[in-house]
Amino acid sequence: MDKIKDLLGGSGRRGEKERAAGGGVIKEPPMEIDGRVMTVEEFAAYVEGLDFPPPLPNRIFLHHTWKPTVESWRGRSTILAMKAYYEKQLWYDNQGNLHEGWTAGPHIFVAPDGIWLFSDLRYDGVGVYGNNYRSRHVEMVGNYDQVLPSGAVLENTIAVLGILHDRLGLDPKKLAFHRDFSTKSCPGWAVKKEWIIPQVEAWMEAYRRAKEAEESTLRRALKRLLKDWLKSPNGQAALAQEAARRGFLGPMTDEIPMEIDDKGYIVQVFAEALIVPANEWERVQSLKEYEEAQKAEKEAPPAVSGSSAPSVVAPPTDPYDFTGEIR
């Protein structure tokens, strides 16, 4: 947690004296955190579904916690302890007013037991003094001044960095370290960019291949057919994100600034596809509707053959274990 003092610019002790003297400290409300822990698959699905408001993030920072270490990590109790710690920190605003309690912190803590969500990924947090605007902060649990991260912490960190860079359309070669803007060692002297960035790039390539493999045969065939017409989408652009949500094939033009009735707009032309079974002309579907119908059909429970009885579906698993006694 030495980074806390660095983020405060050395004002911590001075602030304590002023608070003791009744110097008019502005107490911030309790910090709001997410507090969920996720697997890589859950985190990827979560980030893919996030709606990032403008201005979009343009930089990812990597950190290490130093303390807590992997050995002292206690999951949710540690997360709550860190929240309480941040809520006691002192800082000065641009007008010189003294505040107690951070309003945000790092976004992600990558721990041995999973990926912990802390501050809201959609908005700026706090991680590097003077460099938090349009930045997202990923903390590796542990001290990596002498040893490299390994095991679940390393694997999950690579995945977190990969999905964030992919979703936001950022170049992993521009991954930032806390020490780039500080005298601290964070994310640990042992961690070098030439060591971790190639691992992130390899993960992103495999992730994109896997996503492409999940596409329907029809979509892949259409993309190959239109490959000379389609352009690479800008993952950070609002139009590209909305087109992906609607299931469009891809952009056919770059973004085009236009002025209509004295109001500025950005226009982009996307390829869409409609499909209809031959001789069943009333069953026109969009490509996305077709894919969703195919998926639903595959996931439907099998019908019971030779019986008119309705299909039996298992009830949902009871989240509460039975602790009573059957008499």
Image (cartoon, grey):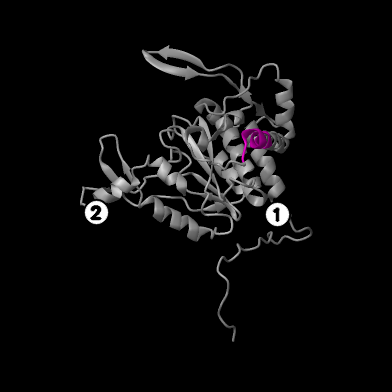
Image position, residue 44 (x, y; %): 60, 43
User: Which residue shows up at 75% across the image and 61% down it?
Assistant: 307
List the residue tagged with mark 1.
301
Image position, residue 127 (x, y; %): 45, 40
29 sits left or right of 68 in the view? left
User: Which residue shows up at 45% across the image and 38% down it?
Assistant: 128
Mark 2 belongs to which amino acid? Ala
Q: Local crowd at mark 2 within 10 Å, few (<14), some, or many (≥20)?
A: few
Image position, residue 270 (x, y; %): 59, 22
Distance in Å between CA atoms under marks 1 and 2: 67 Å
Q: Local crowd at mark 1 within 10 Å, few (<14), some, or many (≥20)?
A: few
The answer to which of marks 1 and 2 sits earlier in the sequence is 2
Whether 244 is among the magenta residues is: no
The label on residue 291 is none
256 sits left or right of 15 in the view? right
Which of labels 1 and 2 is toward the front? Answer: 2
List the residue tagged with mark 2.
20
Q: Which SS class for mark 1?
A: loop
Which segment did they paint magenta?
191-200
